[in-house]
Image: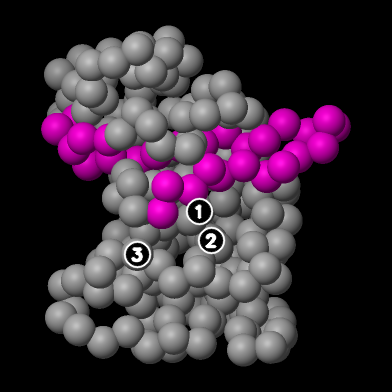
Amino acid sequence: MSRSKKRTTVKLNMAQSLNGYTVQPGGKWQTTSAEDKRRMLKLRKWADCVIVSRKTIMTDNANLYAHASREKKNPMPLIVMRNASEKISENLNVFSAPHQAGEFWIKKGNKKDENDFSFLPESEKSEKIKSKWKIYSFENSNDIINSLSERNYKNILLEGGGRLNGFFLLENLVDEIYLTMAPFIYGGVENNRIALFENSFSEKFRLRSAERRQNEIYLRYQKIFKSQ
């Protein structure tokens, strides 16, 4: 998607260890500081929509709320899945109030029909989710952004994981990166950790700001376009 046609702004917000990983070998992310959480909530207040992968929401069980004021609703949650056979828990925080609805996006050809909720268990809670959440299919990340843009979602916040981040960067969809450098180093077997960006791509960003608060560093990068 070219810059002239892009009507949305996509910001990527993540925290990583000093050696570039987003989770510990055991599969959980080390809790960051209150300041990092404050910055995250500020970005969510800016956002119309927050995009996460199924694996990320299952690992972190984030609520994706922004604690928005009366003047602004919480951002819509959007969960990206590779196929409908990947199970997801109906008890996740993202399915609780104040979010009344959200979207699942499943890789095209990997679901039986437009209402294939086979990834949810049979339960009363699941039935409520099915009545409020919608399912869409996609071939690439551009499909997601184009759909959101057409429906007037202009401020998109991407919160990973690594594979999803990589796909958005591969398709030149990320305008800014907000990165928290946390004071941890994770060892162990590499396939037990998740990198900040997966997939093969090459992108260049300009450093907008760098700020140290106690033991964390907050970096903000902006996309460099060919005309710049």
Q: Which mark is residue 28?
A: 3
Along the line of sight, the residue nearer the viewer: 191 or 166: 191
Q: Cβ–Cβ below 8 Å for labels 2 and 1? A: yes
Residue at disc 2, secondary structure: strand
Residue designated by label 2: 12
In terms of image quadrants, where is residue 127?
A: top left
Q: Amino acid at mark 2?
A: Leu
Label 1 or label 3, whichever comes before in sequence order: 3
Residue at 16% over, 72% down: 191
The quadrant of the picture occupied by the C terminus is: bottom right
Q: Which dot marks residue 158?
A: 1
Which residue appears at 55% of the width and 72% of the height?
32
Residue 139 seen: no
Whole-number angstrom distance, CA of label 2 to CA of label 1: 5 Å
Range shown magenta:
60-88
Q: Amino acid at mark 3?
A: Lys
| Mark 3 neighbour class, 10 Å CA radius: few under 14, some 14 to 19, many 20 or more | few
Q: Residue 227, image x and y in percent?
A: 60, 72
Q: Position of residue 136 (x, y in %)?
A: 35, 25
